[in-house]
Image: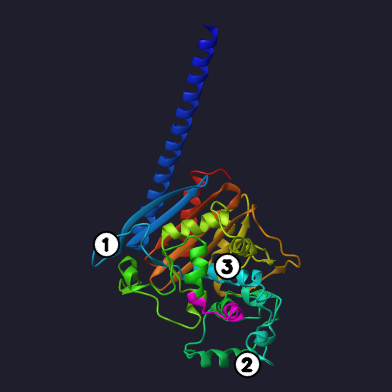
Amino acid sequence: MKIILNKLVITTLAATIVMSNDARAENNNQMLRKAVDKQAERLMQQYQIPGLAVGIIVDGKSQFYNYGVANKEKNQAVTQNTLFELGSVSKTFAATFASYAQGNGTLSFDDTVDKYLPELKNSVIGSTKLTQLATYTAGGLPLQFPDNVKTDDDMMQYYKSWQPTFAENSQRLYSNPSIGLFGYVSALSMKVDYAQFLEIKIFPSLGMSNTFVNVPANKMNDYAFGYNASGDAVRVNPGMLDAQAYGIKSTSADMVQFIKANLGLVSLDDKINTALKSTRKGYYQASTFTQGLAWEMYPLPTNLAALLAGNSVETITQPQPIDINNSPQIALHNGWINKTGSTNGFGAYIVFIPAKNAGIVMLANKYYPNVERVKAAYAILDSVISR
C-alpha cells in the first residue's frame, strides 16, 4: 500500500508541475500579448501607421501579432506572410552574402576594392579594404549616392573621383555606397548576380521562402503598399546598389526564421552558419555600440538610453568617433544585436539576444522614427525576459 501511495504522490506532483508550467506559459503569453497590443496601438495611433506585423521569439518559441492593413484601398489585412520593405535591414544580408563568399574562399575582407574592380586602380576607393567598406570607415562615403548617379557608368565614375573627408578608420559615417559596394564586390568575387544568388542560395539556405529582392508576380498580392507622409501609397524605387543596401522585401515569418538562424535554433549547413557568425564580429566601438557587419551590438544588461543614442538620427547622419578593435571577436552571447531599416513608405526593426534565446522583428508600412521602434521593442521584450 505504501508503494502505491508513493506512486500516487509522484504522479500528483508531476501533474502539478505540468499544470504550473502550463499556467506560467499562459501567463507569459498574456503578458506578451498585452505588451505588444499596447505598443502597437501607441505607434499606429501616434504615427498613423496602416499596418504592423510583429514576430517575437521568447525561450526559442515564436509568436506572431498582426495589426491593421497591408493595402488601404483593398482593406487587406496584415498577416505574418505580408511582404514589407526592409530598408537597411537588407544590409544584414549583404553582410551574410559577403561572409559566405569569404568562407567560400573567393574573397578576403583584407583585400582592396581594385582586386575585383581593376578600373578603380589608382583611386582612393580602389585602395580601400573591404572591411572598411563593410563598417563605414573608408573616410566619409555619404549616406546616399548623389542624385546624378543613375547608371553603372555613373557609379564607377563617382567612385573614381571620390575623395575622403577624414582619415580611414578614424570615424564612422553610415553609408549606402559604402556597404553597397561591399556587397557588390562580394558577388563579383563569386562571379554571380547578387540578387539572384540571394534568392536561389542564401535565402533558401536560411529557410526563408518568402524573401525577395524582386518580388515575383505570384507574390505581388502579398506585397504591402507603403504610405508616405502625405498618405500616398508608395513602393521603393530602383537605385544604385539598392539590393545590397535597402532593397529586400520579407515577411515577419521569414524574419523570425532569420532570427532563429542567428540564434542557432534551426539546422543550417556549415557554410551559412559560419557566415552568420562572422557577421557578429566586433570591429570597433562607436558611440554606444560595437559595430559588426551591418549589425550593431550592445552589451547586456541593455540600457535603453544607449540603444536610443545608437539608433538616433545623429548617429546615422553624422560622423562618429570610433575605437578600433584590432582583434575582432565574434559576439555570440553577450549582447542586444539590432538593425533598423527604412524606405519612403516602410519602417523595420530587428533585434536578437543570443543569451536569452529571444528576439523581435517589427515591420510597418509607414516610416516612423527609429527611436520609437527601439522603445517599443524594448518594452515588449522587457515584459517577458529578465535582463
What colour scheme has been applied to the protein in the rendered image? rainbow
Alpha carbon distance from label 2 to label 3: 26 Å
Q: Is residue 78 magenta?
A: no
Q: Amino acid at mark 2?
A: Glu
Helix, strand or loop at label 3? It is helix
Relative depth, front residue between 315 and 13: 13
First in residue order: circle 1 vs circle 2: 1
First in residue order: circle 1 vs circle 3: 1
Tell us which disc is closer to us: 1 or 2. 2
Up-down: is 25 above or below 244?
A: above
Q: In percent of the image, x 55 and y 67: which residue is there? A: 92
Tell us which disc is closer to us: 1 or 3. 3
Overall secondary structure of the magenta stretch?
Answer: helix
Relative depth, front residue between 54 and 41: 54
Q: Kindly tell me whether residue 360 is visible in this rendering.
A: yes
Alpha carbon distance from label 1 to label 3: 33 Å
Alpha carbon distance from label 1 to label 2: 49 Å
Quarter of the figure with residue 104: bottom right
Mark 1 lies on residue: 76
Query: Bounds of the magenta span?
Result: 185-196
* 191 sits left or right of 62 in the view: right
Q: Residue furthest right?
A: 326
Percent position (x, y) of residue 375?
49, 55
Percent position (x, y) of residue 103?
65, 69
Mark 3 lies on residue: 96
Quarter of the figure with residue 23: top left
Helix, strand or loop at label 1? It is strand
